[in-house]
Image: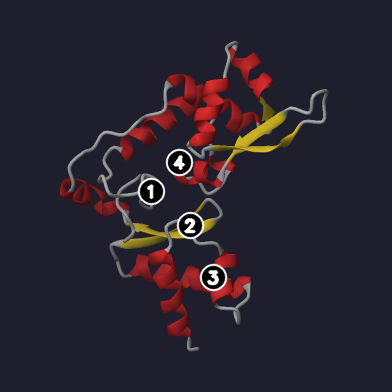
């Protein structure tokens, strides 16, 4: 397969993928390429999009790669669609999510002790939304579950890794700003889709 054909295949995979495309997934499709070669192709594609001033970009997020809209064109995309209402996380849910994000792995009891309230419903809600997961059990009496964030958490907030989280005291405003941006996404689009600046803007297909 020629180099151009390889790029075309990778481009098609990015376009079709509903989630960030993992290097491992590309390798399964293009078995003759190793991980470094795949990274090189992704880097070249990204540079070509940037240099040509295309309306799309390729970014790294949540351990994978995705095709997104260029941030310069976000205002035009928002004009194309009407605003829609989305269910925001409550203040209590955000506080609980912040504790889990910054203290993980953490038990339900530890979360409740920090917040000084019962967090059973909040934890269940965050589990149902896919933002947190059971990450194992703590080696202590009763072997309680410990919780951590998910890949969907990273996708939702447009983060490549937990290292990009803001300071814990800034998390609430950071999360609220992201949710406000999500409201600008059309009804039929996935709220996890972002533009290259990390702001939700438009579906990649």
Q: Are marks 2 and 4 in contact (CB under 8 Å)?
A: no
**Number of residues whose C-alpha sits closer than 10 Å to that of mark 2, classed few (under 14), some (14–19) or many (20 or more):** many
Residue located beneath label 1 in the image:
197
Q: Nearer the viewer, mark 1 or mark 2?
A: 2
Q: Is residue 40 visible?
A: yes
The colour style of the image is secondary structure
| Residue 26: mark | 3
Precedes in sequence: disc 1 or disc 4: 4
Q: Is residue 166 visible?
A: no
- Give the alpha-carbon distance from disc 2 to disc 3, as whole Å: 11 Å
Image coords of residue 41 (percent x, y) = 50, 74
Residue located beneath label 4 in the image:
157
Is 10 situated left or right of 138 in this image?
left
- Give the alpha-carbon distance from disc 1 to disc 2, as whole Å: 16 Å
Does dot 2 land on a helix, a strand or a loop?
Answer: loop
Q: Residue furthest top?
A: 116
**Number of residues whose C-alpha sits closer than 10 Å to that of mark 1, classed few (under 14), some (14–19) or many (20 or more):** some
Query: Which residue appears at 34% of the width and 31% of the height?
Result: 87
Precedes in sequence: disc 2 or disc 3: 2
């Amino acid at each position: 397969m020629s180099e151009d054909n390889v790029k075309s295949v990778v481009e098609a995979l990015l376009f079709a993928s509903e989630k960030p495309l993992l290097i491992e997934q590309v390798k399964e499709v293009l078995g003759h390429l190793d991980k470094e070669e795949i990274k090189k192709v992704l880097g070249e594609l990204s540079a070509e999009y940037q240099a040509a001033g295309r309306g799309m970009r390729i970014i790294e997020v949540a351990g994978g790669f995705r095709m997104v809209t260029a941030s310069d064109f976000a205002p035009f995309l928002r004009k194309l669609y009407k605003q829609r209402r989305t269910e925001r996380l409550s203040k209590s849910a955000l506080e609980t999510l912040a504790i889990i994000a910054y203290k993980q792995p953490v038990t339900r009891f530890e979360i409740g002790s920090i917040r000084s309230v019962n967090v059973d419903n909040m934890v269940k809600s965050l589990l149902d939304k896919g933002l947190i997961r059971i990450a194992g059990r703590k080696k202590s009496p009763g072997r309680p579950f410990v919780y951590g964030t998910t890949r969907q958490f990273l996708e939702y907030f447009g983060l490549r890794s937990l290292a990009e989280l803001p300071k814990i005291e800034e998390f609430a405003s950071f999360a609220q700003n992201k949710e406000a941006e999500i409201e600008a996404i059309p009804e039929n689009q996935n709220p996890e889709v972002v533009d290259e600046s990390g702001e939700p803007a438009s579906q990649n297909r």
